[in-house]
Image (cartoon, rainbow, N blue to C red):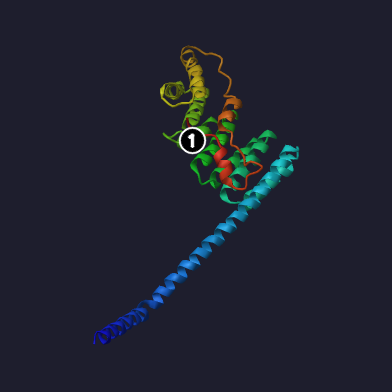
Amino acid sequence: MVDFINEVEEELRKDDYNKLLKRYGPALGVIIFLIIAGTAVFEWKKSSDDRVARAASASYISAAELAQNGEVDRAVDSFLALADKAPAGYSGLSLMRAATLELEQGSRAKAVALFDEAAAQFKLPRHAHLAKLKAAYILADNGAYADVSMRLDSLAAKDAPYEYLARELAGFVAFQSGDMTTARQEFTYLKSIPGVPSSIAQRATQYLSLVPAELEAETVAPEPLTTEPVEAELETTLPDTNSNTINDSENEAETPRE
C-alpha cells in the first residue's frame, strides 16, 4: 500500500513538472538562446576590435617611421589617412602627430586646425584638453590673444586636466595684452595654491615680479613663453613601437596635474 502511494505521488510530481515545462519551457529556451548568442556576439566584437587596433597600431608605427626618416609629407599623409579610419583614440593621436609635423614645417594654421580636429576625436577629457591647449599655445605665439582667451575658459576651469598650464597661459596672454590685473590674479593663484608643479610656480613668480614694474612705467616685455618647458609638460607619448593598443599609449602619457 505504501509503495502504491509513493508511485501515485511520483506520477503527480511528473505531471507537475510536465505542466511547468509546457508553460515555461519556450521562454526558458529563448533565454538560454539569448545568453549564448549574446556571448558569441561579445566575443566576436572583442576579436574584431582587437584586429582593428592591431592594424591601426601597425599603420601608426609605419607613419612614425616615415617621419623619423625625414619623409615628412608622406608621414603627414599617412597619419591623416589613418585618422580617417582608425578608432577614436588612434585617430586623435594621428591628428596630433600630423599637427606636430605641420608645425615643425612652419604651417601653423594647419597645425591649429589639426589639433582642434584631434580634440574633437578624443573621448578622454585629458587628451582633448591637451590638443586644445597645444593649439592655444600656437595661437599665443602668433599673437592671437583674443582667440586664445576664448579657448582657455574651459581649459582653465577648476580641476580641469591641465588647469595650471591653462591658467599660466591665461596670465601670459593677459600680460601681453596689457591686462595687468588679470595677469596678477592668474600668476598669484599659481604661485600660492598647493599642488601647482614647481616649474609653473617658478615661472608665475618671475612674471609676478614684472607686473608691478609694468604698472608704474613702460618696461621691456618679457620673452613669450618658450616652447621648451611647455613641451616638457605637455608632451604626449605616442604609442610604443611594441604597442598594439591605444591603452599602451595612454599608460605612458604624463600625468596632467601633480
Could you say where residue 43 lies in the image, as x and y percent from the top left? 54, 60
Callout 1: SS: helix
* Residue that carries the numbered disc 1 in the rendered image: 150
Residue 91 is left or right of residue 155, and the answer is: right
Q: Describe residue 113's horizontal placement relative to residue 212 as left or right.
A: right
The one of 146 and 67 positioned closer to us in this rendering: 67
On-image quarter of the N terminus: bottom left
Residue 249, horizontal then vertical, whole percent: 58, 41
Q: In this picture, is 40 found above or below 131?
A: below
Give the amino acid type for the residue marked by disc 1 in the picture.
Met
Residue 118, by quadrant, is top right
Q: Residue at x 56, y 62 (%)?
A: 44
Camera sees residue 26: yes
Q: Position of residue 136 (x, y in %)?
A: 55, 34
| Residue visible at 60% across and 27% down in the picture | 227
**Front residue of this view, candidates 257 and 19:** 19
